[in-house]
Image: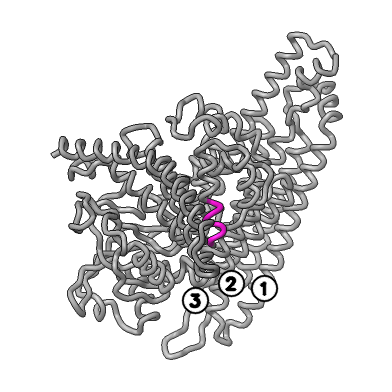
């Protein structure tokens, strides 16, 4: 086994020591109140009968940490491997002395900080243990569990940072690039060219391996801690435009692998929050959840008061206890990572979580959001959108109308019920275009589990299906100015107007990197944007994007660090909608999607222009100049709207013929 692999295993062992050590502190001496007494005492534990056992265990723990530290120091000092000659080792160490010294110093500093943190934790735990006779068992339990969560996250962060710093220390020097040397007039032979290509391949391989190792370590940590940590992992999985494939693929299982809350804990939460038992509210309550998410889970039940079948959304009880300290821990880790890797500014990620999570954890707010979006779409009778009715809502529990349907990405379900997947994708685009460009009130978590399709219950929509939108915890309101600039930006993208793209990129995102911003917003290559956004995505385009994203990573992070929070959530919403659209459309061309969005962009700008004309008429009366402006406004609107309506009409005709053939 080579020295680098041994070093990586030692770092993993160090992380494991931190976690198991704190778990030991929490479970070794549990505290209970004896019968007839309210004062908690230490429960007899066959592993810890004598106080001396605890002291010896702490000594063993400290000794293991010191031994592991010495082993890491030895491995660092022994690199490179034994197979190298003394002359080669001397030469390599002379070349790498500075980078090795920095990596070793940072590693020792991290270990020293972790050991200091552990010493402080042990001291605090002893203080709490001394106070247990005064009724502080709950404080003891909370502090130890919180410490385990913090140190687990911190230790994982230290290991990942150290692994990246060490594994990527041999980055090829751009000054050795044969192209650079030739430009400087330096002759380059075939051997030098081959060495450069070999160095690039070795570095790419090392980077891919450290990406995968680190992603797996982080995923294990997130799954152990649950709650907002899993929410963070889901955010990472969706950042395909920014993170390496090794990271996004590794985090993807977190979308469907959330820990489930026991029925007894749910009953306790209902009793604590509502002051009544589960049987008082529900005549039946299915113990098997319909779905489990990072923040809550949903059960099927029947209300006792009226016999209505409902979906009961219940927040995971442990979130109340740890959400604040977990958010601070995540923010601290991201801040430290930013200091270690200053070229990557990820502070916006923790800032957005700190704003959005409190909204998602308040079901009273979620009810208000759902009622508002239902009011927005009520005047649109031809829309198949359904918003489940909420019967009652409290901060951590909510009962709403039960919707029986299939996920929006379940093409087999749609075909079995004679529903055209292309028509579903089209109406989904129409619904969210209405939200973004007309209402300015946008659902920001439209992943496939939050959108259901069912055979039509409504008779006024004109469609044979309903689209049910669930989980209204996260919305973002767009100001009129932002909404209109966003519409103008999309219109500029669709018309490939580079001057307007530059202008509205600056107004929306405050950046001059309009090419990078456009690619993030559309998910397409710049050459495609310049030619035709409506053309199908090709393998060549995908390969070009994958090849160029690493080269633009710093610029992408710079853009994300400066854009308003509204844009961050719109990026996420666009990515989720694109993935759904690509999953269910039978025709690969996005032309119909662009046509629908183009219509709504034009409509938003037209509505604003007409509102301004009406305002001028009220202020100064009607005159010939206003009439001229009115005709110009109508011409500008219908010149774009009419061709797009024809495209939509043709597609609508195709969809109806498809539905008839499916019957």
The residue drawn where x is 57% and y is 33% is 526
Indicate the quadrant containing the N terminus: top left, top right, bottom left or bottom right.
top right
Pointer 3 local density, CA inside 10 Å: few below 14, some 14–19, many at least 20: some
Instruction: Tell me, yes or no, whether the two marked residues, 1 and 3, touch with CB atoms within 8 Å.
Output: no
Asked whether, in this view, residue 476 is left or right of residue 369, the answer is right
**Bounds of the magenta segment:** 480-486
Q: Note whether 285 is above or below 247 in the view shown.
A: below
Q: Residue furthest front?
A: 624
**Comparing marks 2 and 3, which lies closer to the viewer?**
2
Tell me how far mark 1 sits from mark 2, CA to CA: 9 Å
Q: Which mark is residue 124?
A: 1
Asked whether, in this view, residue 457 is left or right of residue 262, the answer is left
Asked whether, in this view, residue 385 is left or right of residue 172, the answer is left
Can you identify the residue that label 2 sits on?
143
The residue drawn where x is 24% and y is 41% is 420
Tell me how far mark 1 sits from mark 3, CA to CA: 20 Å
Of 398 and 339, nearer the camera is 398
Q: Earlier in the sequence, mark 1 or mark 3?
A: 3
């Amino acid at each position: 086994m080579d020295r680098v692999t041994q070093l990586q295993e030692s770092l993993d062992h160090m992380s494991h020591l931190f976690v198991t050590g704190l778990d030991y502190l929490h479970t070794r001496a549990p505290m209970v109140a004896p019968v007839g007494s309210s004062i908690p005492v230490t429960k007899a534990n066959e592993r810890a009968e004598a106080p001396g056992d605890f002291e010896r265990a702490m000594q063993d723990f400290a000794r293991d940490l010191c031994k592991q530290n010495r082993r890491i120091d030895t491995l660092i000092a022994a690199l490179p491997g034994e197979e190298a000659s003394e002359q080669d080792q001397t030469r390599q160490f002379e070349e790498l002395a500075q980078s090795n010294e920095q990596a070793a110093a940072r590693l020792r500093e991290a270990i020293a900080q972790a050991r200091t943190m552990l010493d402080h934790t042990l001291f605090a735990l002893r203080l709490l243990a001394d106070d247990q006779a005064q009724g502080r068992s709950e404080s003891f339990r909370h502090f130890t569990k919180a410490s385990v969560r913090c140190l687990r996250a911190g230790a994982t962060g230290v290991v990942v940072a150290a692994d990246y710093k060490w594994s990527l220390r041999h980055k090829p020097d751009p000054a050795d690039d044969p192209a650079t040397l030739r430009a400087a007039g330096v002759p380059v032979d075939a051997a030098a060219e081959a060495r450069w290509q070999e160095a690039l391949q070795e570095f790419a391989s090392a980077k891919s391996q450290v990406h995968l190792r680190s992603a797996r370590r982080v995923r294990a940590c997130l799954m152990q801690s649950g709650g907002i940590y899993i929410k963070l992992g889901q955010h990472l999985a969706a950042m395909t435009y920014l993170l390496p494939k090794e990271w996004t693929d590794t985090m993807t299982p977190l979308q469907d692998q959330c820990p489930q809350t026991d029925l007894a804990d749910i009953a306790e939460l209902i009793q604590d929050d509502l002051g009544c038992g589960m049987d008082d509210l529900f005549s039946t309550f299915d113990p098997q959840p319909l779905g489990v998410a990072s923040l809550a889970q949903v059960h099927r039940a029947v209300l006792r008061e009226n016999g209505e079948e409902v979906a009961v959304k219940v927040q995971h009880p442990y979130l109340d206890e740890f959400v604040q300290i977990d958010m601070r821990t995540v923010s601290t880790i991201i801040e430290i990572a930013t200091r270690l890797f200053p070229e990557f500014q990820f502070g916006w990620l923790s800032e957005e979580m700190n704003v959005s999570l409190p909204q998602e954890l308040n079901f009273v707010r979620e009810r208000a959001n759902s009622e508002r979006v239902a009011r927005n779409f009520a005047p649109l009778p031809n829309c198949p959108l359904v918003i489940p009715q909420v019967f009652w809502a409290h901060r951590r529990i909510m009962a709403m109308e039960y919707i029986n349907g299939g996920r929006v990405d379940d093409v087999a379900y749609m075909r079995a019920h004679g529903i055209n997947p292309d028509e579903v994708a089209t109406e989904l685009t129409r619904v969210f275009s209405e939200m973004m460009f007309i209402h300015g009130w946008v659902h920001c978590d439209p992943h496939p589990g939050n959108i259901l399709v069912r055979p039509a219950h409504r008779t006024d929509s004109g469609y044979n299906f309903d689209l049910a939108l669930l989980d209204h915890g996260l919305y973002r309101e767009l100001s009129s100015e932002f909404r209109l600039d966003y519409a103008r930006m999309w219109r500029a993208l669709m018309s490939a107007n580079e001057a307007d793209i530059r202008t509205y990129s600056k107004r929306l995102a405050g950046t001059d990197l309009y090419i990078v911003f456009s690619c993030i917003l559309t998910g397409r290559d710049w050459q495609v944007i310049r030619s035709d956004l409506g053309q199908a995505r090709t393998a060549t385009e995908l390969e070009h994007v994958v090849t160029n994203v690493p080269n633009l990573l710093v610029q992408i992070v710079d853009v994300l660090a400066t854009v308003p929070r509204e844009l961050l959530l719109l990026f996420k919403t666009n990515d989720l909608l694109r993935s759904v659209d690509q999953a269910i459309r039978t025709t690969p061309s996005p032309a119909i999607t662009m046509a629908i969005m183009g219509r709504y962009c034009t409509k938003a700008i037209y509505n604003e222009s007409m509102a301004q004309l009406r305002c001028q008429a009220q202020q100064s009366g009607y005159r010939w100049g206003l009439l001229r402006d009115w005709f110009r406004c109508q011409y500008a609107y219908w010149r774009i709207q009419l061709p797009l309506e024809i495209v939509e009409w043709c597609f609508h005709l195709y969809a109806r013929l498809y539905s008839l053939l499916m019957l």
